[in-house]
Amino acid sequence: MDLQLNDRTCLITGASQGIGKGTARVMAAEGCRIAILARRKALLDELADEIAETGATRPQVIDEDITEEDAPKQIRDRVYDSLGGLDVLVNCAGGSRPIPWDAPDDAWHEGMTLNFEALRRLTLQFIPKMRDQQWGRIINITGTSEPGAVNIASSAKAAVHAWAKGLSRVLAPDGITINCLPPGRINSEQILNKVHPDPAERQAFVEANIPAGYLGEPEDMACLIAFLASPLARYITGEVIHVDGGMRRFAF
């Protein structure tokens, strides 16, 4: 299937690892001209070199901290300068923030800023030109709606779901779609080093909770991202689509 993504422009945040890194590989393979964004420049340069070696256009590397106050405008300017515009925004940046029930306000501020406010503020920078061109794709990597304990990221990503749903209705007449993808357990730095660092415990979790029987790979997310980014997905907007090997227990 031709996804009709050749020469489309795409920004991927959180691209130094995991889902963002896998998405960069897939989008570049589909012919997109991409910019990759994260704080760890060395990892971005390594990824850009890897992609260039495949024959794809070398990605534009943008090393910025999206939580900084002036970052959204700086990122927008760097994207427009290097790519000439933006068709697809993939918001992968974020991180789990498990906390005790009585965590202080500064912990909540940091977690909500990273997982919601920074995403929202960055997205707003690109919407005006997407509306002008009457085409755009916004894809947010979010998180579970079934928290097992207090985690700031769960609250923040729930906010992303509600915000994106409302925004999808406003932007649909302009040819812009916005969708959210909550990942399950994906084989990534965050899952392997932070969530399930012990291999035996990790395998026990998989056997007890994931009907598919294994951790997903970043490309399992990236292939759906590529489809949603394409013109073929024009009628899909305002959705929350779980990619988790069947881990989610609720039907609705």
Image: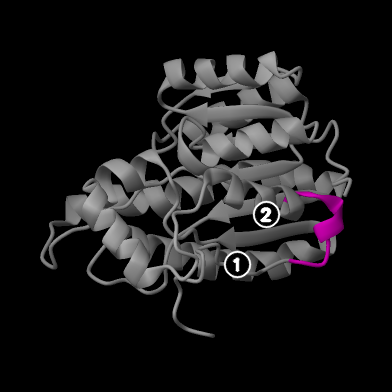
Q: Whole-percent x and y of residue 66?
A: 44, 36
Query: Measuring 88% from the left and 43% from the top, which residue is drawn there?
Result: 4
Label number found at residue 241: 1
Query: Measuring 51% from the left and 45% from the top, which residue is drawn there?
Result: 92
Q: CA distance from mark 1 to mark 2?
A: 9 Å
Quadrant of the rendered structure where residue 62 is? top right
Q: Amino acid at mark 1?
A: Ile
Question: 10 Å neighbourhood of mark 1: few (<14), some, or many (≥20)?
Answer: some
Q: Circle 2 — which element?
A: helix
Query: Measuring 74% from the left and 61% from the top, which residue is drawn there?
Result: 171
Residue 141 in view (yes/no): yes
Q: Is residue 37 magenta?
A: no
Question: 10 Å neighbourhood of mark 2: few (<14), some, or many (≥20)?
Answer: some
Residue 124 in view (yes/no): no
Q: Circle 1 — which element?
A: loop
In the rendered image of this protein, does residue 185 appear above or below residue 110? below
Q: Whole-percent x and y of residue 103?
A: 13, 59
Q: Which residues are magenta?
A: 229-236
Label number found at residue 183: none
In the rendered image of this protein, does residue 149 appear above or below residue 230? below
The residue that disc 2 covers is 224
